[in-house]
Image (tube, rainbow, N blue to C red):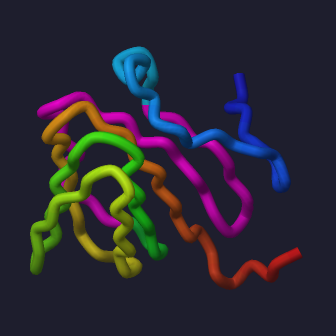
Amino acid sequence: MALVHAQPLDVISVRPLAARISEVRTHSLLKTDRVQLMRLVLAAGQAVPEHQVTGEITLLCLEGQVLLNTPGRQCGLAAGDLVLLPAGEPHALEAQTDSSLLVTLLLRQDVPAP
């Protein structure tokens, strides 16, 4: 079964999950040729091992507290904090509390905008 994504101009809620956070899994919200939006949900203590993506990425902490590790820096993200990672930047995440983040991935810069 194909994953259902929102379409351009659809309204997507990224409100905090609050008490429902343990019931929701990480999922993709929207995907086009150029960009993908995902809600990353992590339980307290859960980690995302070091990895990298080819395009630029933003991480917006919607709720909770997450530790972001890169080779040159470690920083904490709390609700409302946003960070941009350059293309190819190795990074890892660890949730300090139950957390959700809005992840924006720039997939391809060479695709012209409609």
Residue 23 horizontal side relative to residue 114, left or right: left
Residue 8 horizontal side relative to residue 78, left or right: right
Residue 18 lies, with reference to residue 96, above or below; the image says: above
Residue 78 lies, with reference to residue 110, above or below; the image says: above
Across and down, in percent, residue 61 comes to 36, 52
Residue 8: quadrant of the picture: bottom right
Q: From the image, which quarter does the C terminus lie in?
A: bottom right
Q: Magenta stretch containing residue 62, yes or no?
A: no
- 5 or 14, which is in the foreground? 14
- Specify the principal SS of the magenta part: strand
Residue 57 lies, with reference to residue 44, above or below; the image says: below
Total number of numbered discs in the rendering: 0
Across and down, in percent, residue 66 comes to 21, 49
Q: From the image, which quarter does the N terminus lie in?
A: top right
Q: Residue at the location (17% across, 59% down)?
A: 76
Q: Magenta stretch containing residue 28, yes or no?
A: yes
Across and down, in percent, residue 40 comes to 41, 42
Q: Residue at the location (16% across, 46% down)?
A: 94
Q: Residue at the location (56% across, 42% down)?
A: 14
User: What segment is highlighted magenta in the picture?
Assistant: 26-52
Residue 107: quadrant of the picture: bottom right
Across and down, in percent, residue 80 comes to 38, 57
